Image (cartoon, grey):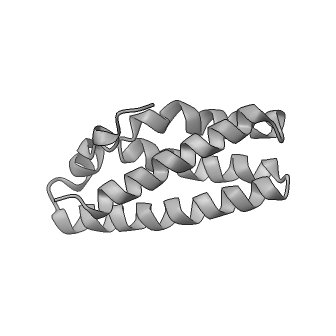
Amino acid sequence: MFDNSNIVALTDPESIAKGNVEFIEQMIGIFIDMANRSISEIKDAYHKDDFKTISKVAHRLKPSIDNMGIVILKEEIRELESSAEAYKRSEKLEKLLVHTEKILKEVIVQLKHRS
């Protein structure tokens, strides 16, 4: 289990935005849209045994996860990117996908309800 009280550390986006609240909100909105779309793409690809697409989607998500400061997914997203094709349909890949989806959904909730 993980402590979901502090999944998102917005220090990176805030330093990139140099205090521009509108820009930060725009970055958050883009991240939420991309994360939701990526979750759907990954689930669809897994059901089609399209492990190459899982790797591609993980690659696309990686910079956003880093920029948003989602440290809890830093290693997992890299493992998905580099190993989805090798893991194929396996318990290891399935656990990794379930965990990544769970964290991304929690991040989305936290971002939507931040003060």
Q: Nearer the viewer, residue 13 or 35?
A: 35
- How far across and down, in percent of the image, does residue 88 sit? 83, 39
Of the 4 image quadrants, the one containing the N terminus is top left
Q: How many marks?
A: 0
The x and y percentages for residue 73 are 48, 37
Determine the residue positioned at 22% across, 46% down. Answer: 15
| Quadrant assignment, res 47 | bottom right
Question: Residue 103 in the image: x percent, y percent?
Answer: 47, 45
Q: Is residue 68 above or below residue 3?
A: below
Q: Residue at x 54, y 51 (%)?
A: 61
- x 41%, y 66%: residue: 30
Q: Nearer the viewer, residue 105 or 71?
A: 105
In the rendered structure, the answer to whether residue 31 lies left or right of residue 5 reads right
Q: Where does residue 36 sit, x and y in percent of width and height?
A: 52, 64
| Residue shown at 29% from the left, 44% from the top | 12
- Most extreme residue toward the front is 1
Is 31 rendered above or below residue 65? below
Image quadrant occupied by the C terminus:
bottom left
Towards the viewer: 9 or 95? 95
Residue 43's quadrant in the figure? bottom right
- For this view, does 63 lie left or right of residue 86? left
